[in-house]
Image: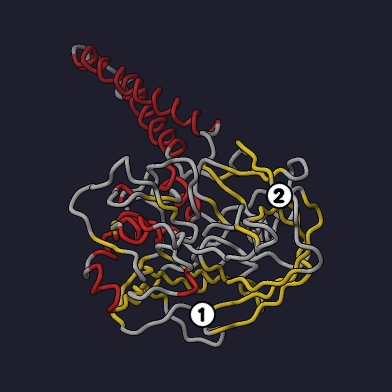
Amino acid sequence: MSVGATALVVGKARWAAPQGVLERRTGAPTLKPVDNGGFVRWQTDAIDVVVDKSFSDLAGDDLFGAALDAWRASGASLPSVSTLPGQDRKLGYDPNGPNDNVVLYAPEGWARANGALAVTVLTYDDTTGRILDADVLLNGGGRNFKRFEHDESSADDLPVSLESPTNTTNTQGKTSRFDVQSVVTHELGHFFGLGEDYDDTRATMYFSTRPGEIHKRILMPGDSDVVTGLYASAPVADKSAPGGCGRAQLAPRPPSTASWIGFASAALGLLLLASSRRSRVAERRVRALAPSHPSRSRRIARFGGWLTVVGLGAFLSPPDLEAAPDTQAVRGDADVEVVAATPRWADGIVETDLTYRVTTCRVANCPEGEQRTVVIGGTLGGVTQIVGPFAVPRQGARLAIRLREHRSFYQMLSPTFRP
């Protein structure tokens, strides 16, 4: 549901797969590791969001709150979100402040969105992962939104990618109506630090949608587990994953040994409680002859109750996160090296001038010599900004890419981060 740069594919700085093979990961929303071993996330108890009049006129006064409620229902320890009305707000971040988190609608479209249904502009501290600012924009310009009363999707409708720019020749993407609540709920996942899901088609964070579908309004277990793990504590990054421009796709960790021990303890505790209740019936008949100290059944009951509480606590503890396994690979047309990356602020948005050259070519007609392009997003002064799902590579990054046309610009294949 977000925008990517149109010129250069960005990927891991290093690949564990054989040369020319691009790893693709599946199974859960992605997260962004940072230098201190944590992940990109809010590190505050409360967030203020300005809801622009353009959005309220489109979606109504209660829709943003309804989308927030879906994430609160996950049980994650999310910061509280307060909303304020506003008008004529803009996307972006001012390093000198002040800044507001905004949600708005661009009826005529936002040029930098490149036709995506919606865009989240996420700005964060490059070292700590602390989110500094997050803006959500619904992109008009011919794309239609509606709040459906019930699901009106059809299997005959082609899914529309919500992560990549919409092909301007795809009339379906411009004439079909998309459920505004599903779109906003998905974007709020990016707002809280989650990326796309490429496996579970029912998930809120799944990367594509169909016209008229509304099921993204409700989180699936994968969505809930990852956001719960992200906000349970400061997660520790997978040390085997490359830092910097690299991405890490995370999944809920399979039940640990402690979890299974907790489950078994709780089950045993419940059995002891049930057994002690049956024993008490027999003890009532001889209570007059019983000693003053606690009966055996009561001791069993106390022990069973204690065991149940401790076991449930271990079993129901917040899930941890670990890197999801790689399940498939895509071969790139060429490898490139980023020779230079020069970022600058442009009206609240980071733009990066990239210079790159092809190091390995596997198809005909790869461009020769140094190539230059401008991409949206980048890192400047310790602050990283991502416009949509694609992070901008830094100088020295080596990337697997795919050619879109003969000697043309490069097309996105594997983003470094899908916020």
Instruction: Give above or below for 346 relative to 186.
Output: below
Q: Position of residue 86 (x, y in %)?
A: 31, 82
Q: Residues within 10 Å of mark 1 (few under 14, many from 20)?
A: many
Q: Quadrant of the rendered structure where residue 342 is?
A: bottom right
Instruction: Decide if residue 204 is on the left or right side of residue 330.
Output: left
Q: Position of residue 343 (x, y in %)?
A: 66, 77
Q: What is the spatial separation of the Cα atoms under label 2 and label 1, in whole angstroms?
A: 36 Å
Q: Quadrant of the rendered structure where residue 418 is?
A: bottom right
Instruction: Decide if residue 380 is on the left or right side of residue 293.
Output: right
Q: Earlier in the sequence, mark 2 or mark 1?
A: 1
Q: Position of residue 371 (x, y in %)?
A: 74, 69
Q: Secondary structure at mark 2?
A: loop
Q: Residue at x 58, y 41 (%)?
A: 324
Which amino acid does the dot numbered 2 rest on?
Asp
Instruction: Tally the numbered discs.
Output: 2
Q: Residue at x 71, y 67 (%)?
A: 394
Q: Which residue is mark 1?
A: 93
Quadrant location of the N terminus in the rendered image: bottom left
Viewer-side residue, 234 vs 271: 234
Which amino acid does the dot numbered 1 rest on?
Tyr
Q: Position of residue 269 (x, y in %)?
A: 38, 25
Q: Secondary structure at mark 1?
A: loop
Viewer-side residue, 180 vs 67: 180
Q: Residue at x 34, y 73 (%)?
A: 105
Q: Which residue is mark 2?
A: 333
Closest to the camera, between mark 2 and mark 1, is 2
Q: Residue at x 55, y 62 (%)?
A: 40
Viewer-side residue, 417 vs 139: 139
Instruction: Decide if residue 96 is on the left or right side of residue 295.
Output: right
Viewer-side residue, 95 vs 277: 95
